Amino acid sequence: MAILFRQMYGMPSIFATESVNERRETNEHTMENNPTKIWNDRYSKTAYAYGTDPNEFFKAELAKLEPAGALLPAEGEGRNAVHALKEGWNVVAFDQSEAARDKALKLAAEHGQQLEYAVADAQEYLCPVMVDVLAPIYLHPPGASRMEIYIRLSRFVAPGGHLIFEAFSEKNIGMGSGGPQGRSMCFTVEAVQQLFSDFGQLEVWEEKITLNEGLYHNGEAWVIRARGTK
Ligand SMILES: C[S@@+](CC[C@H](N)C(=O)[O-])C[C@H]1O[C@@H](n2cnc3c(N)ncnc32)[C@H](O)[C@@H]1O
């Protein structure tokens, strides 16, 4: 399963021996069938899959704001949450993966921080507070559930609150730097504009960046980034 997953999602390119189309079909099939088991497998290793440093865009955008309350959905192993806590933010985080939660709490403890972290699916998660920042970083729900999930998450942002978003573009398919290889799980500028249309001020753009995030996000990558204010 581990090898299969590497080939399908965030695989080092040396493992990618099958065609992009084959990967795309298997990827979408498997991610829709049992994503939690797949993510638990990935996070059950000692190493941090995406490293322990925060995502660069998240860090840069957060630094422009006064610390307040932040919701980090699909937070994985806690790299962004721990950074925000250390910067004085009140953080609520969640992910569908128990293994992710365990690694995130361990990372927080190592940094002397206490993290509020729920195990929940984004389609059902209820945020206990209204927040000032929503920061989905590489949350790629399959196409059918995507709009519902992002609209749901946006509702937890208070008026005047902010969005920080980064995820893989459709143009990243086949780049070998990580991320889903199925078109329905990747983003376009237009799709992200639609997802966050309730943010009055919204900037969305596509950018080619160099990723250096742990084991699974490495090399040149096309991403969609967005910032907004409600
Ligand atoms: C590429 S990882 C990114 C983790 C983290 N945001 C980061 O940047 O390090 C994607 C994460 O999305 C989570 N995820 C995907 N679909 C989800 C859903 N429907 N509900 C909750 N978490 C989800 C996975 O469990 C995984 O931890």
Image (cartoon, rainbow, N blue to C red):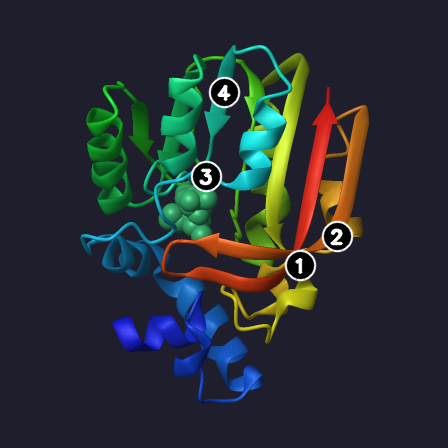
Mark 3: which secondary structure? Answer: loop
Image quarter of residue 229 = top right
Q: Earlier in the sequence, mark 4 or mark 1?
A: 4
Q: Which residue is mark 1?
A: 169
Q: Mark 3 or mark 4, which is nearer to you?
A: 4
Quarter of the C terminus within the rendering: top right
Q: Are marks 4 and 1 in contact (CB under 8 Å)?
A: no
N-term-proximal mark, 3 vs 4: 4
Other-residue count near label 4 (Cα within 10 Å), few / some / many at <14 / 14–19 / ≥20 = many
Judge whether 139 appears above or below 220 on screen. Answer: above
> Looking at the image, is mark 1 or mark 3 nearer the viewer?
1
Residue placed under numbered mark 2 in the picture: 206
Q: How many angstroms separate mark 4 from mark 1 (CA)?
A: 24 Å
Earlier sequence position, callout 2 versus callout 3: 3
Residue at image position (53%, 88%) is 19
Sooner in the amino-acid sequence: mark 1 or mark 2: 1
Residue at 59% from the left image edge and 50% from the top image edge = 167
Q: Quadrant of residue 93?
A: top left
Which of the marked residues, 4 or 2, is nearer the chain's N terminus? 4
* Residue 70: assigned label: 4
Asked if marks 3 and 4 touch (Cβ < 8 Å), the reply is no
CA gap, disc 3 to disc 4?
16 Å
Instruction: Specify whether tag 3 is near ligand 1 (CB below 8 Å).
Output: yes
Q: Position of residue 126 (x, y in %)?
A: 43, 25
Give the SS element for disc 1.
loop
Q: Amino acid at mark 3?
A: Ala
Q: Position of residue 69 (x, y in %)?
A: 49, 14
